[in-house]
Image (cartoon, rainbow, N blue to C red):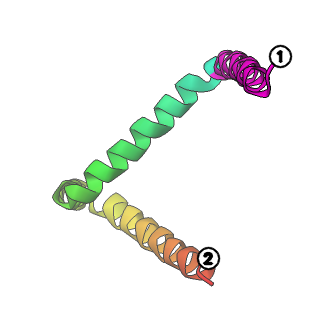
């Protein structure tokens, strides 16, 4: 058998093994696919809110008007969460 035929057969065998491994991996991870879908939906929602910040401001204003005490409490929590997020992001940068 020539070297080229031998290499072609070896390549084909590796391709079959790779396809089987991909199939097994897809089957193994099919159980956690809904979790990935949920995470992706949350990320899309956050991206949408970043594009439409007026919605957050409107909800915050409505909360302040309807329930001022609860609104200020949530505003304070949000402010501290934002500060913590900024500190974490600046600590991550080298």
Q: Which residue is mark 2?
A: 92
Question: In the depicted view, which residue is nearer to us: 58 or 64?
Answer: 58
Q: Is residue 26 above or below residue 63?
A: above
Question: Which SS class for mark 1?
Answer: loop
| The quarter of the displayed image where residue 10 is located | top right
Task: Looking at this view, name the residue that lies furthest to the right.
Answer: 1
x and y percent of residue 44 in the render? 35, 43
Circle number at residue 65 = none
x and y percent of residue 71 in the render? 32, 61
Check the picture and name the quadrant holding the C terminus: bottom right
x and y percent of residue 82 in the render? 45, 71
Q: Is residue 48 above or below residue 25?
A: below
Residue name at image x 51 percent, y 71 percent: 85
Quick check: is 35 in the magenta stretch?
A: no
Q: Which residue is mark 1?
A: 1
Check the picture and name the quadrant holding the N terminus: top right
Q: Which residues are magenta?
A: 1-29
Residue name at image x 70 percent, y 22 percent: 8
Residue name at image x 27 percent, y 62 percent: 68
Please tell me how crowded label 2 is: few (under 14), some (14-19), or many (20+) other residues with Cα within 10 Å: few
| The quarter of the displayed image where residue 13 is located | top right
| Of pointers 2 and 1, the one earlier in the residue sequence | 1
Of the two numbered discs 2 and 1 in the rendering, the one whose residue sits closer to the viewer: 1
Question: Which SS class for mark 2?
Answer: helix
> In the image, 33: left or right of 53?
right
> In the image, 79: left or right of 61?
right
x and y percent of residue 28 in the render? 71, 19
Q: Is residue 33 above or below residue 74?
A: above
């Amino acid at each position: 058998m020539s070297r080229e035929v031998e290499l072609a057969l070896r390549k084909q065998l590796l391709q079959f093994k790779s396809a089987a491994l991909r199939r097994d991996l897809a089957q193994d991870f099919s159980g956690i696919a809904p979790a990935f879908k949920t995470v992706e939906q949350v990320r899309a929602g956050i991206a949408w809110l970043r594009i439409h910040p007026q919605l957050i401001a409107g909800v915050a204003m409505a909360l302040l008007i309807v329930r001022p005490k609860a609104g200020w409490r949530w505003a304070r929590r949000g402010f501290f969460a934002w500060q913590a997020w900024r500190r974490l992001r600046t600590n991550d940068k080298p």
